[in-house]
Amino acid sequence: MGILDNKVAIVTGGSRGLGKAYCLRLAREGARVVVADILAKEAEEVVDEIKAEGGQAIAVKTDVTSEEDTVRMAEETVKAFGRIDALVNNAGFYHGMSRGPFNEISSAEWDKMMNVSAKGTWLCAKAVFPQMKKQGKGKIINVASEACFSATKGLIHYTAAKTAVIGITRVLAGELGQYNICANVIAPDVIDTPATRSYVNMEKLDASSVPMGRFGKPEDTVGAVVFFASDDSDFISGQTLLIDGARRVN
Amino acid sequence: MGRLDNKVAIVTGGAKGLGKAFCFGLAREGAKVVMAAHRMDEESTKAVKEIEARGGFGVTVDVTNEESTLRMAEEAAKKFGRIDILVNNAAYYYGVSRKPFYEVSPEDWDKALAVGAKGPWLCARAVFPYMKKQEKGKIINLSSEVAFSPTKGMIHYVTSKAAVIGITRVLAGELGQYNICVNAVAPGYTDTPASWTIGNVSKFDVTATPLGRVGLPEDVVGAVVFFASDDSDFISSQTLLVDGARRVH
């Protein structure tokens, strides 16, 4: 018996890294999971993993920057599982992004970042809204970053997009409260995933500014997603929760 | 099987209102609960009996008195062998004055700050040696939505609830090395007997609350269970509002 029994959750960017960890844990808590990702083959692999553990899941190839795709993602979810209880807007442009100073980021990369992380979050919320409204309940969990709370160097497009996600969440919380739909944000710090390792040497990263003395693993972030997806957070909306070992406060 | 099986939790101000809801919520998840109350009046005694039926026990504590907080921790450890969770819920709220800032008496100010700010600090001090030895612990401090609002009146209460956030941040900074997480939960106006001493809860204007209603004690329990559970092991120094999206943080 899990705390998400009978619930249906969509995780965008669910095929790798943090998104994959969310999919696996949500399924272990009893949710039927929709692995939505632009990477169709990898998404199917996550579905297979969930099924091997006895869970239920489907993969839906989704480009979150395409409204048509996000609408289809919602439709296929309802077709397969009859409802949508939680949306985890995890898809973002992170793997392979530039880390240069603000005056060296290309305009094209800025646009891509804003499209995937900010517009994608909004479009996916739009897509699931009619179903959640009909149900009289829903949970939207958006993913920002510890970078939004720091005087970061580099990553201006990433940090701007992730901070935009906090703005999106607040408006969604304001507009959707009347339908009993909650929208909240989790903001993880640097987490040890293959994408992070593509540009950071985790072993050499200085954790002396982290009170808990280490950087996070994907498993460290899944509990907050489960909490915001569960009935335990039914009166919590518009909030941002950092997952960073107390490095920043909010 | 609960999410807090085998864990031991102390809840101050645990016999009434929100604190009582926390005690039963934690017990429901499998925790052994120490219901700490300032006064064992008829209502508190009844609540203690109920928590005893769920494997817990009651203890009298004055959170403003260091000796008393040390005894509370000792009794918890003696009875259950460990202390995993401290919920700093005790506050001077029942019947608190809503007068403007220039009419609140210095005595009232001192009482609000003693119970609401010094209390959480003393209780954290009291449980720290046990949590340090266990190399893990969870401290959950109760702040309030009023610390995030342009409140009118209750300057002493609001100040104590804002101070709780400062206490939370320093404790998180100092205790992270011992794998002790410290977070704050900030409820909005919640329907408890104490809230009724402040105003008519049923007439509270919820037009500015997106979720469209006043909170119930049960609404706040989930956040406390989350911060008490292993699901929040890498989350510390954070403040989570539980107020139906009235404020954002």
Image (spheres, coloured by chain):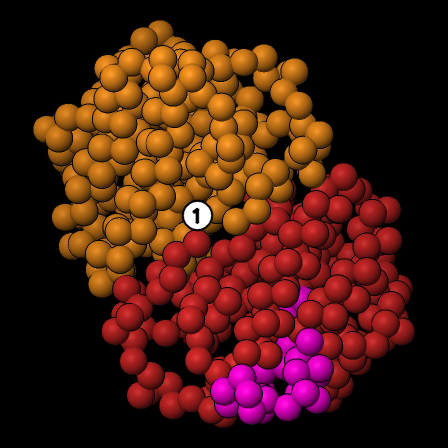
Chain colours: A red, B orange
Residue under label 1: B239
Q: Identify the image quadrant of residue A125.
A: bottom right
Residue drawn at point x = 46 percent, y = 64 percent:
A149
Q: Find residue B88 and report its horizontal and vertical position in percent.
A: 32, 35
* Label 1 residue SS: strand
Figure check: A18 above or below A126: below
Q: Find residue B239 and report its horizontal and vertical position in percent.
A: 43, 47
Q: Does the magenta stretch include residue A102?
A: yes
Residues A29 and B244: in front is B244
Q: For residue A44, say whether it is visible.
A: no
Query: Would residue B159 appear left or right of A81 to someone viewing this image?
Result: left
**Mark 1 Cα within 10 Å, few/some/many (few <14, many 20+)?**
many
Query: Would residue B235 appear left or right of A21 to someone viewing this image?
Result: left
Amino acid type at mark 1: Thr
Query: Would residue B181 appear left or right of B66 to someone viewing this image?
Result: right
Q: Find residue B245 and report its horizontal and vertical position in percent.
A: 62, 42
Q: Find residue B132 and report its horizontal and vertical position in percent.
A: 18, 54
* Magenta span: chief secondary structure: loop
Residue drawn at point x = 31 percent, y = 51 percent:
B169
Figure check: A36 above or below A86: below
Q: Identify the image quadrant of residue A77.
A: bottom right
Q: Does the magenta stretch include residue A79?
A: no
Q: For residue B67, say whether it is visible.
A: yes
Q: Give the range drawn in magenta.
A: A89-114
Residue drawn at point x = 15 percent, y = 26 percent:
B65
